[in-house]
Image (cartoon, rainbow, N blue to C red):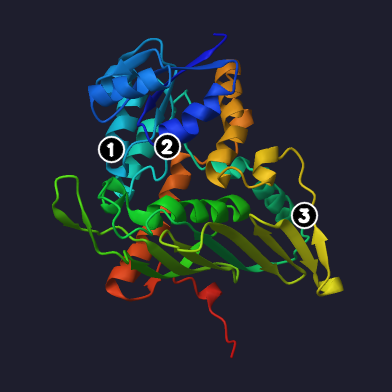
Amino acid sequence: MNKVRIGIIGTGVGIRTHLSGFRSIEQAEVVAIVGSSLARSQEFATKHNIPFACANYKELCNRSDVDLVCITTPNRLHKKEVEYAIKQGKHLICEKPLSDNIEEVSELISLTNGYKKIAIVDHQLRYNPYIQKIKELIENGVLGKVYTIKLNQQGTGFANPNASWNWSFEGESGGGVRLAMASHFTDLIQYWFNSPSIISVQGFLNPITKSRIDNKGNIRNVNACTVCNAQINFANELSAQYTINAGSYSGSRFDIQIFGDNGELTFSLQDKLELYLRSSIGSKQIVDVSNVFQDEKENKISIFSGSFRYFAPLIIEAILSGNYDPIKLSANFIDAKYNVSLLNAIKESANCVKIVTLSKDKENCNDYV
């Protein structure tokens, strides 16, 4: 094999992120696409110069000229599409979350035991140079013992109250920002701190605009959150705060603050990565990060779609060589189970207005006042 042939299931993220990411790689070729109907598949195949438009995901997975399947459909469809791709022996990458149902994730874990092909979840931020630099600084002890992480994201996608209904506003298909964004935040915690034991979770969810009009003129209730806030306590005195709002009126933000007993790291789209040390309180150090695309430095591309460009070449390299070390940092299906357990605890806490306790380890009891 001298080229990886790719099939994309889904025409949203699949086109915006996966197609553009793989198109920049000489040894990769997107050969097939599936939309919500054959007509939509044909429309996007023609528009984006993709050779084959398939009627459904099975037709795409059955193609002998597809080596890698990218699953970028609504969340409720992931499980059956992942299952079928595995049965056809394909390499696959699935958009997060793998499923919103922990039993389904467990079934997929069992299905991939001993699987010889790539089966990963697209948490592309793990491959962003800034995110990797943060992990390096944490693991090298620059911050000392980390005790608090604050993660904030806001965007304008749900801000327009007159935006027409789409699957993002439906809980099972889209899951709102809890599944779209809190899943990324949870994966960052997993990546930086090796999936620390979750003690307790307190969540808040709100759709803000509680009804939308669909393309037939019907009023439909929105049950997917526009706002997701959470307070999560982990083992070893580590806590995290999520604040997410897809209905912002002021624009986009992506902010990280990490507090340790010896230092503090901050990241923002505007100022990038900055370090403050206990030994020189108030003195800012700009952290140099290499191999960053220029358009990302200038905020001309989303950090999410932009991060896939670091990830995509490594996927292709791994498939062509048969050596999966280049993507050993990727989120696997076991990671997905941890992720969804925390996301579901946020939902349970918010819907039942309570703190959800996931661990009662007495070692985590303190006597602070």
Query: At x 31% / y 41%, what residue is drawn?
Result: 74
Q: Earlier in the sequence, mark 1 or mark 2?
A: 2
Which label belongs to residue 252? none
Q: Is residue 161 visible to us here?
A: yes
Q: Quadrant of residue 312?
A: top right
Placement of 10 over or under 58, stated as above or below? below
Measured as percent of width and height from the top left, residue 88 is found at 34, 19
Q: Quadrant of residue 229?
A: bottom left
Measured as percent of width and height from the top left, residue 80 is found at 27, 33
Placement of 10 over or under 39, stated as above or below? below
Left or right: where 356 falls relative to 167: right
The secondary structure type at the circle numbered 3 is loop
Which label belongs to residue 77? 1
Q: Which residue is mark 3?
A: 140
Q: Earlier in the sequence, mark 1 or mark 3?
A: 1
Q: Which residue is mark 2?
A: 13
Packing grade of label 1 (10 A; few <14, some 14-19, many >=20) is: some
Quarter of the figure that contains the C terminus: bottom right
Placement of 25 over or under 108, stated as above or below? above
Quarter of the figure that contains the N terminus: top right
Q: Are marks 1 and 3 in contact (CB under 8 Å)?
A: no
Q: CA distance from mark 2 to mark 3?
A: 35 Å
Q: CA distance from mark 1 to mark 2?
A: 15 Å
Residue type at mark 1: give it. Leu
Residue lying furthest right: 280
Residue lying furthest bottom: 369
Q: Is residue 330 visible to us here?
A: no
